[in-house]
Amino acid sequence: MKDINDILNHVNNILADTAKTRSGKKPERYKIKKIPVDNTQKLKQLLQAEYSTAYKKYLDGKAIFRGVYPNDAEWIGKYSVLKPGIRIAYFTKNNLYTRLFSGILPSWRNYPPRNNCFIGSSSTGKALVYARWAMRVEEWEDNLYVLLPKNGANICICPTSNILFAFPKILKMREKSVKFKHLNDFQDGFMDFIGSITLIIYELKIREAGKNISKDARDKYFGLLRIRRLLKESLDSGGTAGIISILNILSKYLSEYIDDLINIIEEADPVLKSRGFKAKDRYNALLFLKELKKYNTTNLLEYLDIILNAKENGFKNVTIEDYNIKALVTKKVGESGQEVWTDAECLYVNKPFLESLI
């Protein structure tokens, strides 16, 4: 196998192809771009031209809604055309599934990329979840928009109101006290798994080399201890090639050491204690190792595409012309309707204002 440090140094270098710089700031070209609509007359023209299909769907009761924070509503105004920028998942420690669903997993490659999209809902109640920082329902509605994708846009339709609950296989995974309630739990567990196995594989490599291991040999395997950090950074702000490279490195090591890893964990090898492994760490690592055995693979991308497969989990990829989800208009804030997203340019129109035009 090629020196892992050479590969990881390459991955580190291609983090320059970022959606967010190391300083935490997004380059200008990755931000959402606003194209102002001059006046109501121009808006009406757009509704009859480039956004006519989505507008007709809205009139037919098949609208897409999006709630926004008050400061975003002020920026958008009553109506604007917006182009999506590069996005990182909110309210989660890891950006794994967002990147996997953005051209990495084979089953997702024809879908709108999750990291470059606008997310909406077929339900006003779900959309209002993201607008409820205002105090009164009337104020929430000021932050509720009808999302009108441009003619010909691709739309991904989630089978549930929230993508986090759209993967049944995740709910069945369990090892002792470790189980997952939703997609965020799964991706956090997967990242912890990466950290655990790279640490154990490093110790295995040192053990194989014997007590008289040279500093050069030790340094050769030190890159294993950098994998989790580099993977996290790549998921947040790196290019697709770096993510794939890291997962392929790990897959090659797993093909060689999966049985050893299982034995070390099941037999409570002293290395686990010396490295500070807690019971949850052991059970989590064992869960994923058994999963790989169950599906007869050590290829991590292949495994992830089995668990998170787009079609098998009921996700649909349609054009706006074929979008036919009935809208649910309700003031009851909460999970309802179906989550949808598109990577297309969209016309945002404040819902009460759009209704006033009819």
Image (cartoon, grey):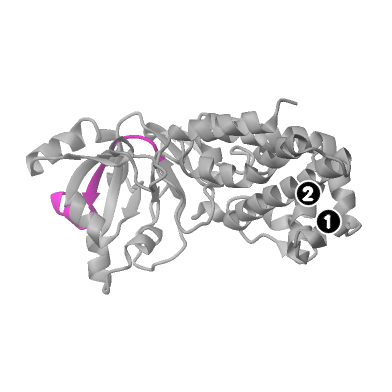
Q: Is residue 325 visible?
A: yes
Pick the front one: 144 or 104: 104
The local secondary structure at tag 1 comes to helix
Residue under the point 86% across and 38% down: 209
Coordinates of residue 218 in the picture (x, y in percent): 75, 40
Residue matched to label 2? 200
* Left or right side of 263 for 196: left
> What residue is shown at x 25% (from left), y 35% (from top)?
51
Q: Does residue 202 appear left or right of residue 183 in this picture?
A: right
Residue situated furthest bottom in the rendering: 135
**Disc 1 marks which residue?**
271
Proximity of marks 1 and 2: CB atoms separated by less than 8 Å = yes
Queried whether the magenta region covers residue 18, the answer comes back as no
Can you tell which quarter of the image residue 40 is in?
top left
Amino acid at pointer 1: Val
Give me the residue at 82% from left, 48% from top. 290
Residue 143 as seen in the image, left or right of residue 102: left
State the residue at coordinates (71%, 61%): 179
Which mark, by number, is residue 335?
A: none
Magenta span covers which residues?
A: 342-358
Position of residue 163 measured from the top left corner of the image (x, y, whole percent): 52, 51
Quadrant in the rendering for residue 104 = top right
Q: Residues within 10 Å of mark 1 (few under 14, many from 20)?
A: some
Please tell me which residue lies in front, 182 or 12: 12
244 shown above or below 38: above
Q: Nearer the viewer, residue 113 or 326?
A: 113
Q: CA distance from mark 1 to mark 2?
A: 8 Å
Give the quadrant of the N terminus: top right
Q: Secondary structure at mark 2?
A: helix
Q: Quadrant of residue 346?
A: top left
The 10 Å Cα crowd at callout 2, few under 14, some 14 to 19, many 20 or more, is many
